[in-house]
Image (spheres, rainbow, N blue to C red):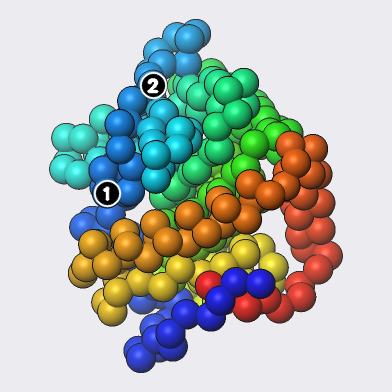
Amino acid sequence: MLDNPPATVDVLTAAQRVAIARHPGRPGVVEIVNALFTDFFEQCGDLSSTDDPSIMGGIALFHGRPVTVLGNRKGSDIEERVACNFGMASPEGYRKAQRIMRAAEKFGRPVLTFVDTSGAYPGMEAEMHGQGEAIARSIELMSSLTVPVIAVICGEGGSGGALALAVGNRVLMLENAVYSVLSPEGFASILWKDASRSDEACEVMKLTADDLLELGVIDGIIPEPAGGAHENPEALFQVLDTYLARELAALDKMSPTALANDRYRKFRAMGSNAVKRGRV
């Protein structure tokens, strides 16, 4: 059971948390890697066609230990955001992630993922290149890994595009992150034919960390500084480092077979077991 965090003074609505999760200054995978890891070596390309910059991955040291790091890269300015499709990965991005995860499995490196995407890129070219198949293969591969896998939803976690990097032994969420089957705007458009009701959709969808912890979808909540992670990134990095180190130490006690079986049972039970769990 994970420890409880300090109580948050301000109670935010689901819509307010969505706004914080989307804040352009919110730290993403690039900032997290620079703050928590050393000797990061980025690996590019899917060994088949091209490189998708919206998925960032490679090898790094975490407290002196080799690990594999993967995450969705949204970009820090408009030029980079366009190049990264605003964090929406193409099939080539997911195939790059699979290549990097296979190397982690081969060399026994834990896999740490940082999820921040509104979903996979929905363009026609992506569909022609096998978007659905690439996502499914990533989920299949992550399910079978025999190394520790920790996934952190650090901003938006949207649809299968997020799940493709979130099949972990431990799935944690930052306090103001959101995780859902689609965007609130998309939900409102489909259910009510009115995207302007997105704030109402945020409440109905149960997409906040508190909601998902209660439903058993995630394993813990990592507290953020008041106002959101963008207000004090350094404070967040210190807390995130502590929890990653603790969860990794716990998973190290499990055998390779036990790690794979644990992940399989965890996701098979999802939806049938809504037992309440403690917060981080």
Q: Is residue 170 visible?
A: no
Q: Position of residue 109 (x, y in %)?
A: 55, 32
In the rendered structure, are the residues bearing label 1 and label 2 in contact, judged by CB atoms less than 8 Å apart?
Answer: no
Q: Position of residue 76 (x, y in %)?
A: 20, 44
Residue tagged by mark 2? 43
Of all residues, the one furthest to the top in this rendering is 48
Say left or right for 237 vs 213. Answer: left
- Marks 1 and 2 sit apart, C-alpha to C-alpha, by 19 Å
Say left or right for 135 vs 90. Answer: right
In front here: 38 or 137?
Answer: 38
Residue tagged by mark 1? 35
Which disc is residue 119 wearing? Answer: none
User: Residue flagged by tag 1: what amino acid is it?
Assistant: Ala
Residue drawn at x 17%, y 41% is 78
In front here: 106 or 101?
Answer: 106
Residue drawn at x 49%, y 43% is 113
In primary-sequence order, the first of circles 1 and 2 is 1
Q: Position of residue 211 (x, y in %)?
A: 59, 75
Residue 275, quarter of the rendered image = bottom right
Of all residues, the one furthest to the bottom in this rendering is 9
Against 231, is 86 above or below?
above
In front here: 250 or 96?
Answer: 250
Q: Secondary structure at mark 1?
A: helix
